[in-house]
Amino acid sequence: MENQIVLPTKNEYGYYEIRLESIGGLGANLCGKMLGELGAIYMDLNAASFSSYGSEKRGSPVKAFIRYGEKETEIGINSPVETPHILGLFHEAMIGKSAVTAGVTENTKIVINTDAAPEQIREKLKLYAGTIYCVDALKIAMESKTRVNMVMLGAIARASEFIPLEAALDIAKETIGKKYPALLEANLTGIRRGYEEYTSKHFTPDKFEYVSYQEPQNEWGYINEPIGGVNTSFGSTVSNDLSSSREGYIPLFIQERCINCGLCDSTCPDMVFQFARGEYKGKETMVNKGLDYHHCKGCMRCVDVCPTNALVMGVEREHPNPEHAMRNQELLPERMDYEDVGANSYVTSESYMTEERVDGGLM
C-alpha cells in the first residue's frame, strides 16, 4: 500500500518526531527502524531513523529516534529528538533512573508499556503534561507469543493518528515475514492488539514542572579522566542497580524447603544470598535468610543448582514485593542510586504459557 500522508503537526523544521526510550533486549532499535521504513516505503514521506546505545547487552539504556518530513521537506539533521511528538517508553522500570520525559510538552503523546492506569503513570513519571497511552505490551506479548516491540509498534501507530494500521502490518510482513515466516502471524496479532488495546488520557500542565532535554553529561572526559585508564570505582556493582539486567524473571526463595547447603551462594555471580548464624535441625549453622534483589541480575543459576526446589523462577511483575527480600548487609552503602525501580519487562514470551508453576514461581 502507498498513501500520501499529511502530517498532523510539525516542529519549526517541518518534521514530525518520535523518540523511543528502552533497555537492550526489548527491540526498540528494530521498532525504530521499522517506523522509519514504513514512513518512507508505505506513506511516501521522507524519513530517518537511528539509535543510540552503549554496550550491546540486555539491560543497558537504548534510545531510538525517528523523523518524518513531507515530500517537499528534506531531512537535513541527524541529532537526537529533543521535543518528541510521540515518546515511546518500553520499560516502566526506567522511570526515575533517567529523565525519560525530558522535552515532553502538552502536545506530546506518551505510549508506555504498563498495566497501570494513565493517572498512576502520570504520578510516577511526574509528567509535566501530554496525553498518556497505556498499553500492557508485556501481557499482550505473552498471550500472542510475540515481542514487546511489535505491540508497541501498533500502539504508536494508533497514537500518531496518521500511521495506518495496514502500513504497520505491511512493514512487519516485509521485515519479519521473509526471515521468520513461522512467526509472522503472531507478530501481526501483537501489532493489531497494540493498536486496539489501550487506555489514554490527556493531562494539562497543572502539577509538575517542565523537564528540558539535555544530552547526557559525564563527570570525566578527555581532559580530566584518570591517567592510565585507572578504574577508581572498583567493585562498582556494590553501588550499581543490576535489576534492569533481569529478563522479566526473578528467583523466589521458599525457605521451608532450604537445607542451607550454600550451593546458591557459591554459584551466584553477584553474591546476593544473605546467610547469618542460626539453627537448622537442632544444630548451629549458617542459615539462608534471603536475597538482595537490588543486585540480582536474574541469571537463574541459583534455580538451576538448587537440589530441593527451594528456589523457583517467578515472573517479576507478579511479585513486586517478594518474600525474603533482604539487602546485602555487608556491602550496603549510605546512599543507593536508582533506588526506586520496578519489574523488568523482558520475558521469554514463547515459553511463558507452557511453563509449570509451583508456589507462585515457575519450575
Image (tube, rainbow, N blue to C red):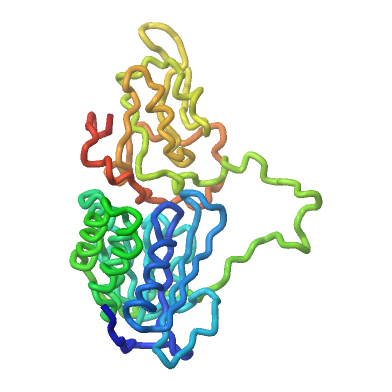
* Residue 4 horizontal/vertical position (percent): 30, 87
* Residue 329 horizontal/vertical position (percent): 51, 33
> How many labels, in total?
0
**330 on left or right of 117:** right
Give me the residue at 33% from left, 18% from top: 308
Front one among 341 and 333: 341
**72 on left or right of 141:** right
Residue 349 appears anywhere in the view: yes
Question: Is residue 221 shown above or below 48?
Answer: above
* Residue 149 horizontal/vertical position (percent): 34, 59
Quarter of the image that includes the N terminus = bottom left
* Residue 297 horizontal/vertical position (percent): 46, 40
Front one among 258 and 149: 149
Residue 135 sits in quarter: bottom left
Residue furthest out toward the right: 227
Give me the residue at 29% from left, 46% from top: 349
Quarter of the image that includes the C terminus = top left
Residue furthest out toward the bottom: 72
